[in-house]
Image (cartoon, helix red, strand yellow):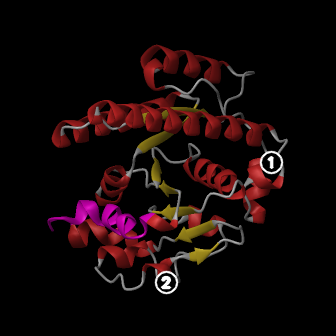
Amino acid sequence: MKVWAIANQKGGVGKTTTTVNLAGLLAISGNPTLIIDLDPQGSLTSYMGYNPDIIEKSAYQLFQGRVGNPASFMLETGISNLDLLPASSALATLDRQLGAQLGKGLVIKNFLDSIRENYSHVLIDCPPVVGMLLVNAIAASDTLILPVQTEYLALKGLERMVNTIQMIERSRKREIPYLVVPTMFDQRTRASMDAIRQLQEFYSSHLWNGVVPVDTLFRDASRLGVPLTLWNTRARGSEAYARLLRSLLATENAQRTAMMQEARSNAV
């Protein structure tokens, strides 16, 4: 099972859109996939047709230690091979309730370890602020995906996110792989072109070599509660996310091959 956390310390940059569309592609390809909403605003939960203000079982209960049967937390999405662990608005209270308690940074990781055989991929939609929820997502993830809107203020959010990653890397003494994904790109605007140049200058070693363009069909798909990548496969946004997924899976395959080769070398 591979875990991808979709994060940025700025809202409105395409985190939920990225989560939904990558997950839809994985699911339709026959990969059992779980999407987790760790944002108290519950955008991913709402996208899938549920109300985070009235939901009974959510990620919130995991932090309260009330797990029980893990399957009882999963909700159907109407898409084959795709389940949802929803958010509830109560998640916003966790830092105040539990911030001083030890061991709460691994709640999501420990939960995922218990269902590791059930899914090939897990995608976590993260809140745009540093706190217990974001730390949990990073601790549980194999790779961070950092969507960044191609405009100036979003680049400042990315800078803060990368600083957070580096801080956690120093404290845990391990590298956290991450991929920067430019979103809402419009080649007709100077702001988008300037943002791409800055991303190439400062984040070249972590920058995906494509872009997710502005596409009004994303709004139409969200209104219907389906990933654009399944609703209209020929849309510009769908094609961009299909390329991104191929890139992510190619990296996974390369890492798996390298690990197998290293294991064989050590066995000789």
Q: Say which of 60 and 124 sits in front.
A: 124
Q: Residue at x 65, y 68 (%)?
A: 48
Q: Quadrant of residue 90?
A: bottom left
Q: Quadrant of residue 47?
A: bottom right
Specify whether residue 101 is painted magenta: yes
Identify the secondary structure beneath mark 1. Answer: helix
What residue is disc 2 on? 72
Front one among 230 and 125: 230
Instruction: Name the amino acid type tagged 2.
Output: Ser
**Apparent side of residue 101 relative to residue 138 in the rendered image (left or right):** left
Q: Which residues are magenta?
A: 99-116
Q: Could you tell which of marks 2 and 1 lies nearer the N-terminus?
A: 2
State how many labels appear. 2
Q: What residue did someone put label 1 on?
A: 217
| Residue positioned 35% across, 34% down in the render | 264
Q: Residue at x 47, y 49 (%)?
A: 4
Can residue 160 be seen in the rendering of this structure?
A: no
